[in-house]
Image (spheres, grey):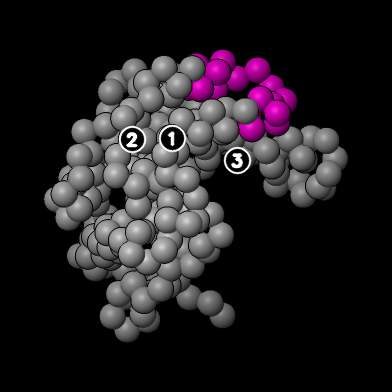
């Protein structure tokens, strides 16, 4: 019989900081010296991502969700300047981290199939978009453990990443909103396949509510100007 492991709050806090430490370390890899620059074209990465995910949403759209159209327009209208490119994971979260069972230190990161080179703040925004807090909805919390007692808050994650990386995170809200938008598009793509009968898994029927929920969350973040 499986048992749930409860991590004490103080260890959970250390673990959340260690996860961000690993992301900082990843973003410090020299992409020129290692040859990783060959993985992609970092110039114009932010624009390509925003426009690309907007197009994917349009191709998979099944329902009228005004917030998704608003977000697409806002993201394109507020494109930030490109930062120094780095190697990025593009799906960096607790799910893809392997922990040492004794020390609870991060020993490996999995799922590199979406990795490329580009603005590291896009990678950071994706991590932020997965980072749920205790006050977030049950749907969002079902995908992560970052809301458990002891974890850094999203604001603390931004401050810690800035301190450790030395990067300017003043525009973190933009990248957080993009991360939410991208996650909503991914859910929409899966839901579209379900609606068209390409998959029969009834669990996918609920994903349209996820799209709506993430879109509303992103719009609220824009309106309030806070994570």
Q: Determine whether, in the image, residue 114 is placed left or right of residue 102.
A: right
Residue found 34% across the figure and 39% down from its top: 135
* In front of the other: 92 or 77: 77
The residue where tag 3 is placed is: 186
Instruction: Give above or below for 54 relative to 117.
Output: above
Highlighted range, magenta: 56-72
The residue where tag 2 is placed is: 82
> Badge 3: how crowded within 10 Å, few (<14), some, or many (20+)?
some
The residue where tag 1 is placed is: 44
State yes or no: discs 1 and 2 in contact (Cβ < 8 Å): yes
- Who comes first in sequence, dot 1 or dot 3? 1
Instruction: Give above or below for 131 relative to 145.
Output: above
* In front of the other: 112 or 189: 112
Residue 4 quadrant: bottom left
Query: Residue 171 at what x, y percent from top left?
Result: 27, 32
Give the total number of marks visible in the rendering.
3
In three-dimensional space, the C-alpha distance between marks 1 and 2, rounded to whole angstroms, equals: 7 Å
In three-dimensional space, the C-alpha distance between marks 2 and 3, rounded to whole angstroms, equals: 24 Å
Name the quadrant of the N terminus: bottom right
Residue 226 in view (yes/no)? yes
- Who comes first in sequence, dot 2 or dot 3? 2
Residue found 21% across the figure and 33% down from its top: 170
């Amino acid at each position: 019989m499986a048992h749930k492991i409860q991590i004490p709050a103080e260890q959970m806090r250390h673990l959340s900081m260690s996860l961000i430490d690993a992301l900082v370390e990843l973003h410090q890899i020299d992409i020129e010296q290692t040859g990783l620059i060959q993985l992609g074209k970092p110039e114009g990465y932010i624009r390509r991502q925003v426009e690309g995910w907007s197009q994917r949403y349009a191709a998979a759209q099944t329902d009228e969700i005004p917030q998704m159209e608003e977000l697409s327009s806002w993201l394109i209208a507020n494109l930030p300047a490109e930062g120094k490119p780095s190697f990025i994971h593009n799906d960096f979260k607790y799910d893809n981290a392997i922990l040492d069972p004794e020390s609870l230190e991060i020993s490996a990161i999995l799922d590199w199939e979406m990795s490329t080179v580009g603005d590291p703040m896009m990678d950071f925004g994706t991590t932020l978009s997965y980072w749920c807090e205790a006050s977030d909805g049950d749907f969002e919390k079902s995908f992560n453990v970052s809301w458990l007692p002891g974890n850094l808050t999203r604001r603390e994650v931004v401050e810690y990443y800035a301190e450790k990386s030395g990067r300017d995170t003043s525009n973190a809200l933009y990248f957080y909103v993009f991360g939410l938008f991208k996650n909503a598009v991914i859910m929409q793509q899966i839901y579209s396949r379900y609606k068209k009968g390409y998959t029969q898994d009834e669990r996918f029927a609920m994903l349209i509510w996820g799209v709506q929920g993430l879109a509303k969350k992103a719009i609220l973040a824009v309106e309030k100007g806070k994570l």
